[in-house]
Amino acid sequence: MLATMTYDNPSPEINLNSLVVELEHYRRQSEWLGLVNDLHARLSGAVDLPTMLEAFSVWLTPLVEHELMAYENQERNRVHMLCSCHGPDRRQIIEIARKSLKLQTDIAGSYCGLHGNFHLHRWNLDKFKASGIMLVLKKDKKISQYEEGLLNKGLEILSEPLQRALEYEDLYEQASHDTLTGLLNRRVFEERITSIMAQSHRHGHPVTLACLDLDKFKEINDTHGHAVGDMVLQKMAMIMENMVRSCDILARVGGDEFVIILPETELADAQTLANRLCRAIDQFELPALGSSKLGISIGLAELEPGQTQEKWQQRADEALYQAKAAGRSQVHCL
């Protein structure tokens, strides 16, 4: 007779299969918990956005190979990319990422697409109660369903630390920028000048310091009031910011006092920029000033080998003093 199988007395084969399935489930669950703990540990040591994204990319690499990871938050004007490619591939993949970030889409979840030989996955992080867009690009091979599942789970964990990083950067932005003009403040200037000087002394690269002071600013305040004076400072800051390079350090260090650190810039080139600044400000007209003319005096000093920060700043200050003594909108070099 054939043995009869009942639910009360299942066969040994069924018991074994169920056990194997259950053990595999627990193995995967244990493996995922280990990955989660590793990700939390990496993210706990990251405060700012670039470090946070790098930690996530390093965690992701053994699980999902990728050539680029990018994050953009338009509201906060934040964009950061991590790319492991080199040469032509690097230029191509960065251009793909830039174009993809510009795409306007109402898709709440993820979007996949093929661009050349790069497979792109794009997430709207609203899905994870965060804000911004996340991109992951992989060369030649599409991200599998399993890999996409890992990414979804990873992004869900990343979302809260990511928001903290954005809030931290907002606070840093407030602490490092002058509230009236939006320029860097004295504290940041003091931090940056030390490292820039060290690089110049180490590699022998030129760097020039410019000290700037608005001409007859006290008269403007006394005649037209502090509200107009504030407007003048804001307009001057805007003019200067539009004329310096992204690598230059432009800061407001006092009432009408500004400084510019010009890396990789010899004195003659700095003088050319200073003269252009003087002309731009001289030509600027502000209706609230009536017939009053704006002007700025600039003192320049190139860092000398072995020179201390104190001595360098003293030379730039002395050059500014001589520029102001020579009249309105003057540039003097030491």
Image (cartoon, helix red, strand yellow):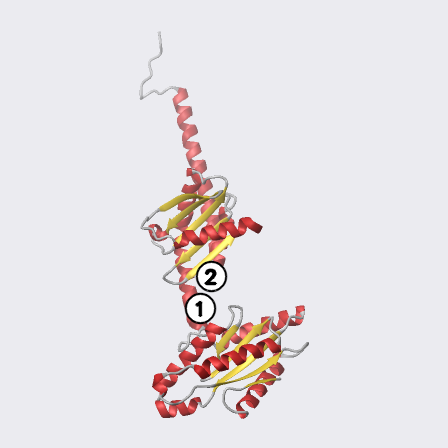
Location of the N terminus (image quadrant): top left
Picture layout, residue 223 above or below residue 40: below
**Residue 268 horizontal side relative to residue 178, left or right:** right
What mark, if any, has residue 160 been given in the picture?
Answer: none
Q: Which residue is at 45% across, 74% downward?
A: 183
In percent of the image, x 41 and y 79: which residue is there?
235
Dot 2, how many residues are within 10 Å of its Cα: few (below 14), some (14-19), or many (20+)? Answer: some
Please indicate whether residue 165 sits to the left or right of residue 202 in the image. left
Whether residue 86 can be seen here:
no
How far from the left and from the top, in percent, is residue 139? 50, 43
Q: Identify the residue under disc 2.
A: 48
Residue 123 image offset from top left, x and y in percent? 38, 49
Residue 215 at x, y percent in the picture: 47, 88
Residue 292 location, quadrant: bottom left
Q: Label 1 sits on what residue type?
A: Tyr
* Residue at mark 1: 172
Look at the image and tell me in which quarter the C terminus lies.
bottom right
How packed mark 1 is, by other alpha carbons closer than 10 Å (few <14, some 14-19, many 20 or more), is few
Which residue corresponds to the image point at 67% horizontal and 70% vertical from the top-left? 204
In depth, the one of 229 and 254 nearer the eye is 229
The one of 293 and 94 positioned closer to us in this rendering: 293
Compared to residue 40, the image places residue 25 above or below, namely above
Query: Mark 2 and mark 1 in contact (Cβ < 8 Å)?
Result: yes
- Distance, label 1 to label 2, CA atoms, is 10 Å
